[in-house]
Amino acid sequence: MSVNDTKPFEPSYDTCKAVSDQCPVEATLYGDYFTTGACVFFALSFGVLFLMQIYYTFKSRAWSYAIYLGIGTGFELLGYFCRKLLSDNPWQFMPFVLQLFMLMLAPTFVAAAIAVTFKHMVIHYGTEWSTIRPRWYPWLFVGSDVVCIIIQAAGCAFAAMSSSGDKDNAKMSDISSVLLILGVVFQVVNMAVCGGLMLIYYRRRAKAGASYGYGSIRPSPDILSSKRNFCGHDRVKVFVWAISAAYVAIIVRCIYRIPEMATGWGSDLMKDELTFLIFDGAMILIAVAFITIFHPANFFPQISKRGKEQVKGEDAIPLR
């Protein structure tokens, strides 16, 4: 009798195709069925927001903002659609891998969409209060987001490989955990630095008593004559609060993800669906909703290609 004949059966995504006595749902990574209603709710919500974004994209032609936000929202939609499939049969490998990839990477794209607006916000209100040149904002902020995406994508790839087959993939699983934790921590640090630079800009602009930073582009005459602060224009003020709330929501999600990944695959925290839906699903839904409903097409047209036509007398730079 060969060794393979005496080896006990171990349920895995390779050996199991559906829930059965040999392949109980408890043996899956999440240990239970996903809640169908929650999966449908989040999928529909992100779907509606995605359709709204398509309309606003052609209205504003803010292409960079639209692309990053659209990818992030589309990933969330696809992620929860796959979780809906897993709620019917948790042993489906491809939906499992896709929801892992999509829901891990989506928030970074949403954060990149927000970062795109920083350069144009600084140009609009005056670059003399900025600690760095405006042209460096997208390179530093969005560029670091790309690094986060690469690290997390690699972590998801190792996680997918460690979940397939019936062999011992402990080492690969450990590598995936390290990469995912590193990617999320890097994103938190990146967002904290970006947010810190914008807070410094806000404080300097609010004081308006001295000139700081690089003054290569003067603030618009309308801003100077009205002596308004950073959140002066009513619509722009709403937009600033919207992206600020979205930014905080994404950071909350990232902070939650760190202990979730650190406790290991299949941990109690990872199996806690309600906690995931609150601190990941709801946080990203709030973020996407804020920056979609309060889209720059209506609240900050200065960043779009049509901004020059819509906002006369102000420094509107096309978003490319």
Image (cartoon, rainbow, N blue to C red):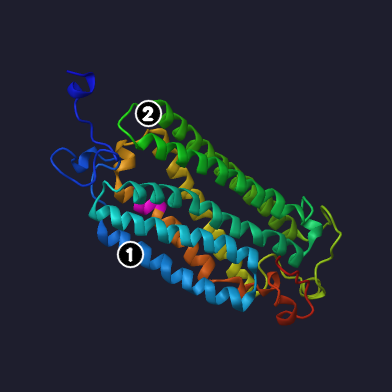
> What residue is shown at x 65% (from left), y 52% (from top)?
142
Q: Is residue 273 left or right of residue 299?
A: left
Can residue 213 be seen in this snapshot?
A: yes
> From this viewpoint, which residue is outermost toward the front?
1
> From this viewpoint, which residue is outermost toward the right?
216
> Which amino acid type is marked by label 1?
Phe
Give residue 306's quadrant in the image: bottom right
Can residue 298 be seen in this snapshot?
A: no
Q: Secondary structure at mark 1?
A: helix
The mark found on residue 169 in the picture is 2
Give residue 268's quadrant in the image: top left
The chief SS type of the magenta part is helix
Magenta segment:
276-280
Say which of 187 and 233 sits in front.
Answer: 187
Q: Is residue 204 left or right of residue 152?
A: right
Residue 249 rendering spot, x and y as whole percentages: 48, 55
Q: Is residue 290 left or right of residue 224?
A: left
> What residue is shown at x 45% (from left), y 36% (from top)?
158
Residue labelled with disc 1: 41
